[in-house]
Image (cartoon, grey):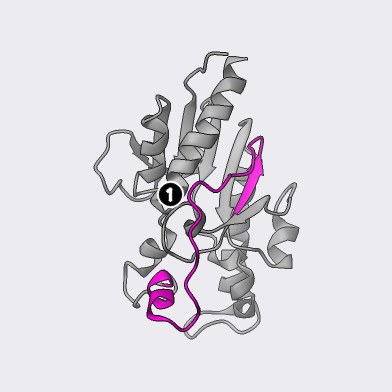
Amino acid sequence: MSMKPMRVLIGCETSGRVRRAFADRGHDAWSCDLLPADDGSNRHIVCDVRDLLGDGWDLLAVLHPPCTRLCNSGVRWLTTPPPGRTKLEMWNDLEDGASLFSDCWNAPIERVCVENPIMHKYAKELIRNYEPPAQTVQPWWFGDPAFKATSLYLRGLPLLIPTNRLTPPAKGTDEHKRWSKVHRASPGPDRWKKRSETFQGIADAFGAQWGGVASEQVAA
């Protein structure tokens, strides 16, 4: 069966890694974000991803949407907000994040991936047609020496298969600390961006595995 190029939208991405991974395999791939692309590509649209959901895409991948209030690790802020913030602001942020996730998860697109950490119960209750993440992957499954658990909420897409699984170093070693660079990133204005970037190995797996399987489905 011959493969047919797909129209692929990568939401909430500025690095261009996943866009390029699909484009390198012949797909009509575009990225979008509220910020411009780091690589200056003319295949990047500065906008809210929701503005593009109805434009006839074959595959949507939304990478680390700005939904920090959905994360189980930050549920404490809903009852005891951080300095300078109110409880009402925290709950409003939660509703905004849940709305973004819901709109992407329920988009009129056959194949959808949304990356997000494990959610707390309040977030799950706000998301339409919520389903648990299909899998949680690590960069070191795909050849990148790093720790960063990433949950994938999948619809119409198969699980990712590890391609170059490394052996994690022992805890307490200097190498383990280097692998933990995402979690140990220094505070600063770009910390959020560094922590949200998709590792190259995972980006390549998206393009190679989903790009191939989904192309065959589109051509069928």
Which of the 4 image quarters holds residue 159? Answer: top right
Residue in front for this viewpoint, 149 or 70: 149
From what the image shows, is residue 163 above or below residue 74? above
Relative side of 159 to 37, left or right: right
Which quarter of the picture shows residue 119? bottom right
| Nearer-the-camera pick, 43 or 158 | 158
In the rendered view, tell whether residue 160 sits above or below residue 91: above
Instruction: Decide if residue 113 is in sight here.
Output: yes
Left or right placement of residue 121 versus residue 139 in this view = right
Q: Residue at x 63, y 37 (%)?
A: 157
Does the magenta run of residues contain 166? yes
Residue 179 lies left or right of residue 110; in this view the side is left
Where the C terminus falls, by quadrant? Answer: top right
Give the residues drawn in magenta, as a range: 151-180
For the point 58% across and 45% down, the residue is 161
Tell me residue 215's x, y (percent). Answer: 54, 23
Of 101 and 63, nearer the camera is 63
**Residue 58 at least partly seen:** no
**Measured from the top left, where is residue 113 in percent x and y?**
58, 43
Residue 123 appears in which quarter of the rendering? bottom right
Dot 1 surroundings within 10 Å: few (below 14), some, or many (20 or more)?
A: many
Q: Amino acid at mark 1?
A: Gly
Q: Quadrant of the N terminus?
A: top right
Q: Is residue 44 magenta?
A: no
Q: Which residue is at the front of the view, 60 or 78? A: 60
Which secondary structure class fits the magenta region best? Answer: loop
Q: Secondary structure at mark 1?
A: helix
- Identify the residue position indicated by label 1 in the image: 201
Vertical arrangement, residue 35 with respect to residue 43, above or below: below
